[in-house]
Image: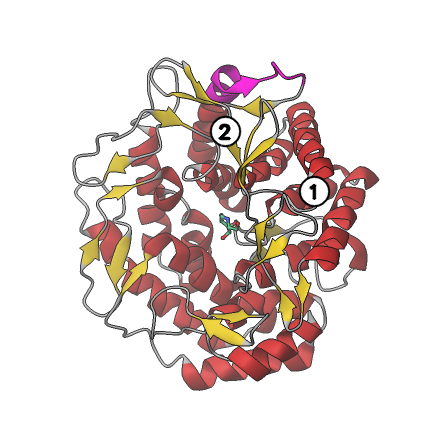
Amino acid sequence: MRRSWQFYVEFAFGHDQIRPVSGGFTEFFVAGHPVGLTIVEALDTLYVMGLDDELAQGVQWIEQNLGDFDIDASFQVFETNIRMVGGLLSGYHATGNQRLLDLAHELADRLLPAFTSSPTGIPYRFVNLRTGAVTGKVTFPAEIGTYIAEFGDLSGLVADPKYYDIAKAAMKATYDRRSDIGLLADNIDVETGKWTSRRATIGPPSDSFYEYLFDGFDLFGDRDLKTWYDVLTAAILEHQSDTSTGHLWFQNVDFRNGRPLDTRQSELASFYAGLLGQSGHPTQARAYHDSWKLVHDRYPLLPEGIDYSTLAATRRGNQLRPEYVDSAFILWLTDRTDLWRQRGLEHYQHMKQYNRVRYGYTIATDVTTTPPALGDFCPGYWWSEQMKYYFLMFANSDRFDYANNYLSTEGNVLRGLL
Ligand code: DMJ
């Protein structure tokens, strides 16, 4: 982490992401409008690791350069929330620096038109941070329902319930449109509230909708969210579980009748093992993580997508993804079985062996070759997610409450920093 940070500072400081092979950089939200994404993502990871000089350097850059978010450009509401609002909030929890909270507050305010200008309460996908103009009227469950952790935390910190309420209303508007068998489809029109697809999936673009129903209950004790989570999860377990290969997978089905559609599974869906474990389904959690372990045994790095009937890679790259070790970390926190640390260690060792390049860690473009072919890009979440999970599993950190904590979908610690 320290080595990668130093290269980021040397070659890309203030830009959203480093290109760790060439020493270049790239922006995540809008070309020409860097917002220091890597710095914001890294703050609480630097804190738990005790990298206090690097943390101070990052906070100083924010104080000196992130004056406000008065930017005349369209930002993706979901990504801005989980990465920037969440990163600033976890940075605030780590440091107590009021400027970080003020920036999170201001940015959340600039996202609000996505919700308030929607006739259904389901947010538009993009908002111009200066003008509040919205675009993107077909959206997805994850982009509708991944706000309650950050917005709820903000509501508590600034004593204004409106952020929590607006996030919960968007989730309810989606939950209320579940099918008769209790499933959600994965595309919906913001303005009409009508589904524009029939596919139910636990992977993207639905994944973190389910995560934040449970998380909203976990963080705020909201029983409505727990009921909605339980109803949708019961339907998923009934209609989407597929053990025909001898291993547990979650098939994509028609949300109206449960008819199987295909056996494709995104790597991002591996997060679901952790969610099942957290929410009282340990048997399925173990079985689903075991299924992904089979994939991990076959490829040096997990492919972005597989067909689980054959384990063939349907998408050959790997965007330096954290989900497998995210689940291992959550499951280890849940039951402290050492198996999960072994899986985390193996994931880490493979990353060190295959993804490490001159100026940090990079994505792979093809995991089916030996060694994997690499790209030239380190995503922001790498700084917030897997580096924190690996570290916390082995560090016995005195800056993290292992018994009472909350990590967001982006790995931002919103409860449990000591
Ligand atoms: C992260 O930005 C978050 O975990 C999000 O919920 C989806 N996945 C990416 C990383 O793969």
Closer to the camera in the image, 373 or 352: 373
Closer to the camera in the image, 152 or 392: 392
Where residue 113 sits: x, y (%)? 23, 57
Residue at image location 71% in from the left, 68% down from the top: 49
In this rendering, the count of numbered labels is: 2
Residue at image location 70% in from the left, 74% down from the top: 2
Q: Which quadrant of the view contains residue 72?
A: bottom left
* 2 vs 1, front mark: 2
Stretch in magenta: 234-246
Q: For mark 2, does the 10 Å Cα neighbourhood hold few (<14), some (14 to 19), or many (20 or more) residues? A: many
Where residue 161 sits: x, y (%)? 35, 53
* Residue 328 marker: 1
Q: Which quadrant of the view contains residue 193?
A: top left
Closer to the camera in the image, 289 or 306: 306
Residue at image location 59% in from the left, 37% down from the top: 270
Name the image quarter holding the C terminus. Answer: bottom right
Does 235 lie within the magenta span? yes
Label located before the other in sequence (2 or 1): 2
Mark 2 C-beta to ligand 1 under 8 Å: no
The amino acid type, in three-letter code, at marker 2 is Arg
Q: For mark 1, does the 10 Å Cα neighbourhood hold few (<14), some (14 to 19), or many (20 or more) residues? A: many
